[in-house]
């Protein structure tokens, strides 16, 4: 069966045509450049940009893959969490197609979709496993005993890890999006230049916190600026900040695996692109024998491939959503099923 996936929850417009379980006949992702000048996503600009490009992107997807609209058997669309105006562009398009083509529609939880990106791998991870979900809006450690059933082991109590990358990048004047900018600058820096805190490492829970770390960077930047010593230190600040974040994530992942007895750790979300996080967890894997799985880079950030795969999962398990399925601005993995 051919599944159409549509993703418009934030600043990526994406369309995917998924054949069967893991063959992407087409997968197009357009990142909006409109926001660069503002140093962050401007919701109104995002929804207008989705509106402009979504249908042309769908047409291109069909043309390039040689598929016809009539071949689509199932439609999956992100319904939340995300920016409401942006979500509605994708949802209205998906509902219209579902109505006109008379095909089933599944509303997809974006956070679950990040995790289910791993189902697109040629050898997908089989539960039980522990998952680390790290994106611009979420930081979760989850125990997965069956796909579709999630036990939250820990979460960030304040900023999401991607959000802290974005905010620190802004402080360091490195531009937007912050994660890749910090990673790039950090390559030229010394991670031991600044002794930033490793928040909540001594806390016995698997919860995390990143806002204090962000504030520690802010104070350091203010001090350096006041003494005229800020210029030229961005790379060292970026490397020291990145090292602190990755150490916290790696330690919490190790503890989550130890406590649950999991032999597999699955990582997902935009921050899973980070090379230091990847190498640090690869070293953990080599030390302990825990299998660590990351999706390929293009399946980490927002994409419609993961949305199509999540829709197919729920459809195959009997779920059917009505054309009334609403958009959700907030929520997480434990957010109620859209069905
Ligand atoms: O999953 P995603 O594309 O969108 C959300 O659902 O939020 O994640 C975007 C987040 C942004 O905060 C971005 O700065 C971060 O992922 N990110 C990275 C890297 N690439 C993207 N963070 C650290 N290192 C990266 N290489
Ligand atoms: Zn996302």
Image: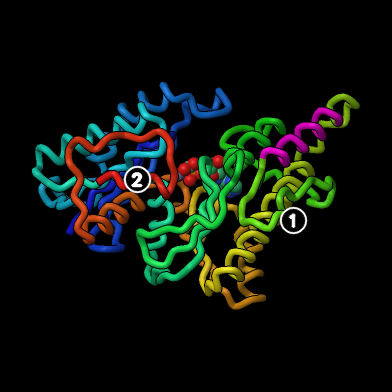
Could you tell me which residue is drawn at 79 percent across and 44 percent down? 236
Q: Left of 265 or right of it: where is 276?
A: right
Tag 1: Cα neighbours inside 10 Å, few (<14), some, or many (≥20)?
few
Residue 338 in percent (x, y) is at 29, 44
Could you tell me which residue is drawn at 58 percent across and 33 percent down? 176
Q: Secondary structure at mark 1?
A: loop
Q: Is residue 188 visible?
A: no
Report if residue 213 lies within the magenta region. Answer: yes
Could you tell me which residue is drawn at 42 percent across and 67 percent down? 145
Q: Quadrant of the N terminus?
A: bottom left
Location of mark 1 (residue) = 202
Location of mark 2 (residue) = 336
Residue 337 in percent (x, y) is at 31, 47
Residue 105 position (above or below residue 1)? above
In the image, 252 versus 94, the foreground residue is 252
Mark 1 / mark 2, whichever is N-terminal: 1
Q: Secondary structure at mark 2?
A: loop
Q: Alpha carbon of mark 1 to alpha carbon of mark 2: how far?
A: 33 Å
The coloring applied to the image is: rainbow
Q: Quadrant of ligand 2?
A: top left
Q: Which residues are magenta?
A: 211-223
Tag 2: Cα neighbours inside 10 Å, few (<14), some, or many (≥20)?
few
């Amino acid at each position: 069966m051919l599944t159409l996936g549509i993703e418009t929850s934030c600043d990526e417009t994406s369309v995917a045509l998924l054949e069967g379980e893991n063959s992407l006949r087409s997968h197009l992702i357009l990142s909006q450049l409109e926001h660069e000048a503002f140093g962050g996503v401007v919701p109104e600009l995002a929804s207008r940009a989705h509106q402009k490009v979504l249908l042309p992107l769908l047409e291109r997807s069909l043309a390039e893959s040689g598929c016809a609209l009539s071949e689509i058997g199932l439609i999956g669309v992100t319904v939340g969490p995300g920016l409401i105006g942006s979500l509605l562009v994708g949802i209205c398009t998906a509902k219209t197609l579902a109505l006109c083509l008379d095909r089933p529609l599944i509303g997809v939880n974006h956070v679950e979709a990040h995790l289910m990106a791993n189902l697109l791998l040629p050898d997908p991870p089989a539960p039980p496993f522990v998952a680390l979900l790290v994106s611009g809006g979420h930081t979760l450690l989850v125990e997965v005993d069956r796909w579709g059933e999630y036990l939250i082991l820990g979460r960030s109590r304040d900023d999401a890890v991607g959000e802290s990358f974005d905010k620190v990048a802004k402080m360091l004047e490195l531009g937007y999006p912050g994660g890749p900018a910090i990673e790039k600058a950090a390559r030229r820096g010394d991670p031991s230049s600044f002794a930033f805190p490793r928040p909540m490492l001594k806390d016995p829970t698997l919860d995390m916190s990143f806002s204090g770390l962000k504030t520690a960077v802010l104070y350091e930047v203010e001090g350096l600026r006041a003494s005229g010593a800020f210029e030229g230190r961005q790379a060292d600040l970026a490397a020291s900040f990145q090292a602190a974040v990755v150490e916290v994530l790696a330690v919490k992942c190790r503890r989550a695996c130890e406590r649950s007895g999991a032999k597999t750790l699955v990582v997902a979300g935009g921050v899973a692109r980070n090379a230091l996080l990847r190498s640090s967890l690869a070293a953990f894997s080599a030390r302990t024998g825990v299998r660590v799985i990351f999706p390929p880079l293009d399946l980490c950030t927002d994409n419609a491939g993961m949305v199509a795969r999540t829709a197919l999962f729920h459809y195959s398990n009997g779920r059917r959503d009505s054309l009334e399925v609403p958009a959700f601005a907030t929520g997480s993995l434990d957010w109620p099923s859209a069905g």
